[in-house]
Amino acid sequence: MEDLILQAETRESTGGLTARRLRRQGLTPAIIYGHNELINVSVNYHNFNMLTHVMHSEHAVIKLKIEEQEFDVLIKEVQRNCVTHNITHIDFLVVNLDEVVKIEVQLEPLGIPEGVKNHSGVLELLRRDVAVECKAGVIPESIKIDVTALNIHDVIHIKELPEIEGVIYVGDPETTLITIAPPTVHEEEVVATDEDAEETEPEVIGEKKAEEEEK
């Protein structure tokens, strides 16, 4: 797998005015921290967006280059404008590739479940991610799960996830991640028949009055 490389530049000043000036220049304010590092930087907005599109996982390690320095980092947080959703700030966490980190990894169901294919069931992904502990250099792209054998009401728990060398699943082993729900049953509308209409035919008031006078 090719290294994910991003260029950054240090910035001396901080604050709202500086951030707005950088954004007008097509740059995004960012910070690098961890392992005794704390550096204010800026990265090219377009280049960062392009990088995220080719990343195999949002938790992939990036090589961040600043002049003669190079850091292995994870994207810790991306802040966005609440209206435009444009990126306004990025936090990069410095990691050692041999250090153990705790991180959320996406679940990836593979195949069409038996209960969906032949019994009109619905695959429900109760959780999209699962927490793992592993070395930063071997964070899996995703946790792939074969779901083809699952039938109606079958479930997959954390304890049933596939074993991956160097990866430890974190959390209650009994936590349910995936289930196959039964198909939704729709009640049929009751259509009135001619017989029902005859049984429920309203009484005519005039006829009832005539009967009483004859008596």
Image: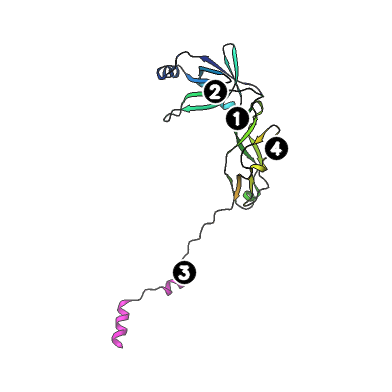
What element does badge 1 sit on? loop
User: Can you identify the residue that label 3 sits on?
Assistant: 193
Q: Do the residues labelled 1 and 4 touch (CB within 8 Å)?
A: no
What element does badge 2 sit on? strand
Quarter of the N terminus within the rendering: top right
User: Which residue is at a point 61% across and 39% down the rendered structure image?
Assistant: 171
Mark toward the start of the polypeptide (4 vs 3): 4
Q: Residue lying at the far left in this picture: please name it.
A: 213
| Magenta segment, prevailing SS (helix, strand or loop) | helix
Which residues, given as a range, are shown in magenta? 193-215
Q: What residue type is labelled 4?
A: Glu
The answer to whether residue 212 is left or right of residue 44 is left
User: Can you identify the residue that label 1 sits on?
Assistant: 57
Q: What residue type is labelled 1?
A: Ser
Q: Are marks 4 and 3 in contact (CB under 8 Å)?
A: no
Closer to the eye: label 4 or 3: 4
Q: Are marks 1 and 2 in contact (CB under 8 Å)?
A: no
Q: What residue type is labelled 2?
A: Phe
User: Can you identify the residue that label 4 sits on?
Assistant: 163
Distance, label 2 to label 4, CA atoms, is 29 Å
Q: Residues within 10 Å of mark 4 (few under 14, many from 20)?
A: few
Residue 85, given in percent of the width and then of the height, sits at 45, 29
Quarter of the C terminus within the rendering: bottom left
The answer to whether residue 42 is left or right of residue 141 is left
Please, is residue 157 above or below residue 187 in the view? above
User: Which residue is at a point 54% across and 54% down the rendered structure image?
Assistant: 184
Mark toward the start of the polypeptide (2 vs 4): 2
Residue 77, given in percent of the width and then of the height, sits at 52, 27
User: Can you identify the residue that label 2 sits on?
Assistant: 92
Mark toward the start of the polypeptide (1 vs 4): 1
